[in-house]
Image (cartoon, rainbow, N blue to C red):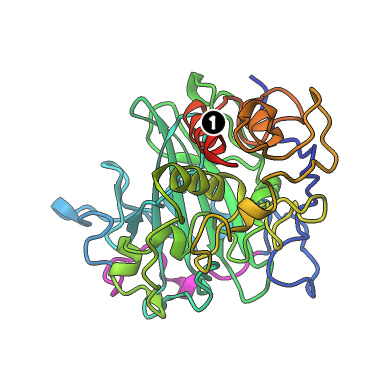
Amino acid sequence: MVSRFLLAGLVLVLWGCGGASGDEPAPAAAGAGGSAGQSGAGSGGEAGSPQGSGAGGAAGAGGAKPPPFVADPEARTRLSEAGFFADLESKQPAADLVAFEPRFAFWSDGVEKKRWLWLPPGTKVDASDPDHWRFPIGARLYKEFSQNGKRLETRLVERTGPGTFDYWMGAFVWLEDQSDAVFAEEGAADVLGTQHDVPKAKLCPSCHNGEPSRVLGFSAMQLEGSPVAAMGLVDPPPPAVPGPPGGDVARAALGYLHANCGHCHYDGGLAWRDTDVVLRLSVAETTVESSEIYTSNLGVPVQFFQEGGLTLRVDGGAPDQSALLFRMNYRGDDKQMPPIATERVDEQGVRLVRDWIMTLP
């Protein structure tokens, strides 16, 4: 099955144009779509930092030693060189990795995912903007994709310097024998006999440049109450965020849209140049009716999309007449949403949004 990473429709993304500021030119994609720099204090993957506390699992059991760490991300060829393992043979994550799970997950065609954060000793995540947490230089975030107990890929986002584009992003594809994962600059299709595709490294910014920290799903809305916050790794401590506003139906739908669409569809996202659709929540929004998801979609005419006579982004009480739901429920060409990284409709997600639209006036 051919990998589908085309940017089209309402989201005509030019990677490198999003993010925090536009005063620095985007560097050429040197291997993994980011400028190379030194890894956090050169200590990545070493156990014993204050962040450890056994969050990633016990390291060194039975005298095992972590694989040698390669500080320069551009020089790494395998996941074992990226500070992830306490022991390569057992695949035990390093003890100073913090496992976390966002409140609402991004749809990845049904594969299972795990996530870990590593911070250089003595550093914290900057949470001064509760909607956009930022990471210190050297921070690394890993995300593992698996299916039926077999690891398929592990993605890494690492902040390599102080600049807007000083991030390394790429994916390591697991070998058939599961002994290690190899950096796949050109991506991979149908990994290990599955339908799971891995994006090319240069395409990572297509989604990630819409977030100033380049990491999706990492904010007070998603992680308040998580181990990352509970272990004191965030400064200032995040406010209590009960989640999206509204009742159960609204909360489920708004949370789903926030996680799956919000990184592109807001005034700082990569889709903003093409459409003023907002599908992202802010912790400041306390009612459904005051949220921009509600005000920018309910009863608002479509801008460019023309399909099946649909004229409104969201038609209250009429999900089948809502362009938003049509595009969520479609795959195959530039009419689909999300436009990339998915080949299967998320039927549960469609159901959540459908149920919410049915409640709207």
Image coordinates of residue 18 in percent, x first then y, are 73, 61
Q: Is residue 56 left or right of residue 159?
A: left
Q: Is residue 326 left or right of residue 23?
A: left
For the residue pair 284 and 20, the one nearer the viewer reads as: 284
What residue appears at the point 31 percent right and 56 percent down from the top-left corner?
Answer: 94
Quadrant containing the C terminus is top right
Question: Is 116 rendered above or below residue 127?
Answer: above
Question: Is 188 rendered above or below residue 94?
Answer: above
Residue under label 1, please give it.
350
**Quarter of the rendering containing residue 117:** bottom left
Question: Is 44 rendered above or below residue 162?
Answer: above
Image coordinates of residue 214 in percent, x first then y, are 60, 60
Image coordinates of residue 87 in percent, x first then y, are 28, 49
Q: Is residue 198 left or right of residue 42?
A: right
Residue 40 colored in magenta in the image: yes
For label 1, the crowd category at 10 Å Cα-Cα, with few meaning under 14, some 14 to 19 and many 20 or more, is: many
Mostly what secondary structure, the magenta segment? Answer: loop
For the residue pair 192 and 214, the one nearer the viewer reads as: 214
Question: Is 183 rendered above or below residue 337?
Answer: below
Residue 199 colored in magenta in the image: no
- Residue 157 visible in the picture: yes
- Which range of residues does the magenta coloring cover? 36-51
**What amino acid is labelled 1 in the image?**
Val
Image coordinates of residue 283 in percent, x first then y, are 50, 66
What residue appears at the point 36 percent right and 25 percent down from the top-left corner?
Answer: 148
Label 1 residue SS: helix
For the residue pair 76 and 52, the one nearer the viewer reads as: 52
What residue appears at the point 27 percent right and 67 percent down from the top-left corner?
Answer: 52
